[in-house]
Amino acid sequence: MQLNEATARRRFGSVPVVRLATVDALGRPHLVVTTFVVDGDHIYLAVDQKPKTSRELKRVRNIRANPEVAALADHYDDDWRRLWWVRADGSARITTDANLMAGPIELLTARYPQYRSDPPRGPVIAITVTAWSGWAYTEPDRP
Amino acid sequence: MQLNEATARRRFGSVPVVRLATVDALGRPHLVVTTFVVDGDHIYLAVDQKPKTSRELKRVRNIRANPEVAALADHYDDDWRRLWWVRADGSARITTDANLMAGPIELLTARYPQYRSDPPRGPVIAITVTAWSGWAYTEPDRP
């Protein structure tokens, strides 16, 4: 069964990591797993690795070339009656301004205790979700 | 640390589901979670839903328009020293011929007991992997 938007958004926000798909300038997809926070119809992620080189990460370069992104949350269980997934389609922008990054980084640090000693440095990727879609094998419990 | 190709391929094949990114004719990414089997540098997936309409699934239409795909396996643990991911980048083709689908569907049915009473009908998506890449927080155990 398809999930309604409220259920889809809630389930998306319940998992620790999602997968982010971006597209490069040549039309090739790129895929990473990432921590995130949901705030209404916005999803925020932050680059948390120390840069190895001066080159920007591919996900960041891709978004600068093409802002269209998709993010997927899913749940697996050997009992397939428990499977579900939620996809957020939207448009992303890159934020490197420290003042604008502060709010999302605070939300991420509050959500993940692992960040408390070493918060993400950024840049921050802010996604405006234009469509939440989702599916579950069986009817979800009503909230 | 980066994973070598053999370790990356092995870990990819160890998880029950991966996420497949495709790109539509307008350059927008699409993302699904899927069962799969790995055979050397090939990955096989099959459409397992009964078609709701005569329209092909978006992943199939996308691959017909643009064969470039990426697939991601990842492992999450609250202990971030156990995190890892593997990405397979490659080129996909759609197979609807029953003779060509038989081998992949047999592999999928052998891997997933859940398919035994109701094997995937197809089409089959066959990915030729051109690059395996992967990362783990800590050194993997040597095989």
Image (cartoon, coloured by chain):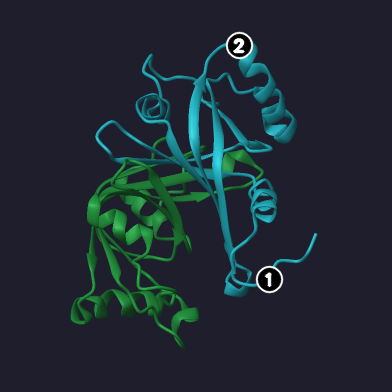
Chain colours: A cyan, B green
Where does the image place residue A64, in percent across and percent down from the top left? Answer: 39, 24
Vertical side of A91 occupied by A93: above or below: above
Q: What type is the residue that disc 2 sits on?
A: Ala
Between B35 and A39, the residue placed more toward the observer is: A39
Vertical side of B127 occupied by B133: above or below: above
> Which numbered marker is on residue A98?
2
Q: Measuring 24% from the left and 34% from the top, which residue is drawn there?
A: A26
Mark closest to the chain's N terminus, 2 or 1: 2
Where does the image place residue A127, in percent across and percent down from the top left? Answer: 54, 33
> Which numbered marker is on residue A139?
1
Q: Is residue B56 left or right of residue B115?
A: left
Where residue A85 sits, quadrant-wise, is: bottom right
Q: What type is the residue that disc 1 sits on?
A: Glu
Vertical side of A102 occupied by A37: above or below: below
Q: Residue furthest bottom?
A: B117
Q: Residue furthest front?
A: B54
Q: Is residue B25 left or right of residue A77?
A: left
Q: Residue furthest right?
A: A143
Image quadrant occupied by the C terminus of chain A: bottom right
Q: CA distance from mark 2 to mark 1?
A: 43 Å
Name the element at disc 2.
helix
Where does the image place residue B39, in percent across and percent down from the top left? Answer: 28, 65
Crowdedness near tag 2: few (<14), some (14–19) or many (≥20) residues, C-alpha within 10 Å? few
Name the element at disc 1.
loop
